[in-house]
Structures are given as C-alpha cells and as structure tokens.
Amino acid sequence: MEQLPDRKRVQEFARKLFGHYTSGILTLMVDIGQRTGLFEAAAKGGGTSQQIAERAGLNERYVREWLGAMATGGIMEYDAASRTFRLPAEHAVCLTGTSSRNLAAGSQGVAMLAKRLPRVAECFKSGGGVPYSEFRPDFTDYMDASWRLLYEGLLVKGFLPAAKGLPERLAAGMRVADLGCGTGHAINLMAREYPRSRFVGYDIAADAIERARAEARAMGLTNAAFEVADVTRLPAETQFDLITSFDAIHDQRDPAAVLRSAAAALAPDGVYLALEPRASSNLEENLANPFAAWMYGVSVLHCMTVSLAEGGAGLGTAWGVQTARQYLAAAGFTSVEVVEAPGPQNSIYICRR
C-alpha cells in the first residue's frame, strides 16, 4: 500500500518553498534599493517614507511600498508609533559604502540571469547552452559591480599576500597577466599599487576590454595594457612572473587548455594564482555548504551553460577542489597550495610548475 505523505512535512516544506520565493523577491527589492540610492538615503538616519523618499529624490508611494518589503523582510526596522523606518548600522555595512563588505550590487545577478531563463530552459530539452555573447552587456555590468569593491578591499591586502613573498616581488617588478580580466579593475588596482611591475589583462569580451582601457587612462596608468584574446593561446614569446585568474576558469570552454597555456607562459620561478569558488567536487560534501545552492543555480543559469554552448567541458561553478587539483596537475603544475580566501565563498590556488 502506497504510503501517504506526512501532512506536517508537507506543510513544513511548503513554508520553506515559499520562503525561497520570498527571498527571490527580496533580492529584487535589494537591487532596486542599491540602484536608486535608497539604502544610502536610509543610512543617513531613520525617517518616515516621505522623509526617506525626499532624501533619495524619489516618489514617496513607491518608496513606502518598498520600505514595507524591507521591514517585513527583516532588512530594515519599523517603529509603528512614529511610523519611521531605520536601517541598522550592521545592515548598512552590507548595503552601503565602499567597503568590500558592501554586498548590495550582488543583487543584480538575479534579474540579469532571469532574462536568460527561457533560453536555458530550452537547453534542458535540446542540450547545448546559451553562449556568453547572449549575456552581454549586462553580465559585464553585473560582474564589474559585484567584484569592484571586493578587489578594492581584498586584492592587495588579502588575495595577493596569500602567496608568500608575492607582494615584495611585485613591488620590485614582475611581468603579470590576468586571464579573463573582465573590465580590468584588478589589473588597474595592481598597476597603481606596484608601478615597477607591468600588467596585461586578457578577455574575449571587447566591451569589457574597452572599459578596462578607459579606466587605465583615467587612472593615468602607463604599466597596464589590455587585449581581446582567447586565453587558451597566450603569446608564446612572453614569459610571465605572475599569472592570475579571478573566478574565471570553471566557465571556460576548454579549461584544460587555459591551464596548460598558463603553465607554459609562466617563467621558471613564476606563480599562478587563481581564485575559484570554495566547494567540493562531491555533491554530498556540499550539502552543508551554505553557498552551494547558489553555486549550482548560478552554474545552470550561466557558468555551465556558456561552456556547453561552445561544446565545452561544462565544469560548472561547484567544480570543486578535487577536480581543480586534477586539472592543475594535468596542466603541468607540480606544486598546488589551496588556502581560504578572505570571505567564505572562495579558495585561492597558489600554483607553481
């Protein structure tokens, strides 16, 4: 006899499922808040919907409804007696300012990925994928916004020092390449910090490279260059002392070729430093990882599909440390050290030939 579903468990799961839907809606509300300056306005002090709307220069009725979502969603506090809203200082740290702890821009990803949802859903039936070209230009905007403050807060003080002695070598002068550089902010920050080193960023997205060059000009940098290039084939005549990649390997069409190219382009005492999502290659070991569902979901909607669209490996966002070590060893790296990056989402791979 077929066992009937447990009614209590059905109700519990229904609440959990609706909680997921609510989180998705709140993510879009956070997106609106960071796009319109509402969080910055609220961070200046408590106020009524009218007062906060006036600070932000926005329509009060829309702001009032948005504040309702913020209050009931636990993002802002509401005092019924005075009908005022308050953004707690601890929440403001994560939603405002120039610190790397400001995560507000990450909310853009949901709306950006949702635009491609119908095309991705088709791939479940037909296979293949949605090519990277179909995600631009808003994917470029999202990645720039999501990583800009992280680079500014953590690149020089956190990511690079993970490799012992690397900051000192950069200060003395190194030849550096960044693979999948996007809008080039990491390169430009390193070039400004280490004027004796020379930097080049490679990316297949011409729109991102143009923005990288424009920023380098605006910063007055003479030691940073950018090229539209396929990073599976780095210039054979150039040897780099440092090669970096930030969240750029797992979604490549041919990650094995990229890593072989990086190994071949390294000088004998060179270092390859890669930042990749912190995960296991085994699903069962990711079940307790609070970021795992996000990784697998983003993989379906972008990282895996852009690789499969080109007939690629389709490693996915949560390709994991075990698979990464296998790929790095096959590429020719004989020394691979894995350390935790600042923040809980990524690992740093420090690789030498």
Image (cartoon, rainbow, N blue to C red):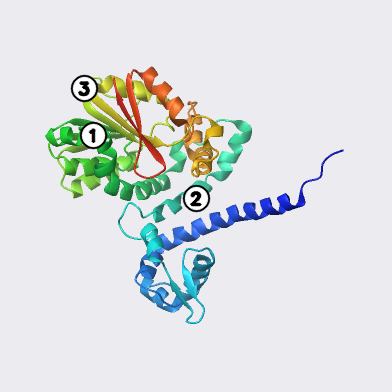
What residue lies at 12% left-to-right and 36% top-to-bottom?
Answer: 196
Task: State left or right for residue 143 relative to residue 76.
Answer: left
Earlier along the polypeptide chain: callout 3 or callout 2? 2
Above-or-below relation of 245 to 31:
above
Q: Residue 277: x, y in percent?
A: 42, 37
User: Which quarter of the rendered picture does the C terminus lie within?
Assistant: top left
**What type is the residue that disc 3 sits on?**
Asp
Graded by Cα atoms within 10 Å as few (under 14), some (14 to 19) or many (20 or more), the crowding at tag 1 reads: many
Rounded to the nearest angstrom, the CA distance separating label 3 from label 1 is 19 Å
Coordinates of residue 175 in the picture (x, y in percent): 19, 30
Q: Report how far apart the C-alphas of labels 2 and 1 lie in the structure.
A: 31 Å
**Residue denoted by label 3:** 269
Identify the element where label 1 is drawn: strand
Which residue lies under the disc numbered 1? 200
Residue under label 2 = 110
| Type of the residue with mark 2 | Val
Closer mark to the observer between disc 3 and disc 2: 3
Residue 350 % position (x, y): 31, 29
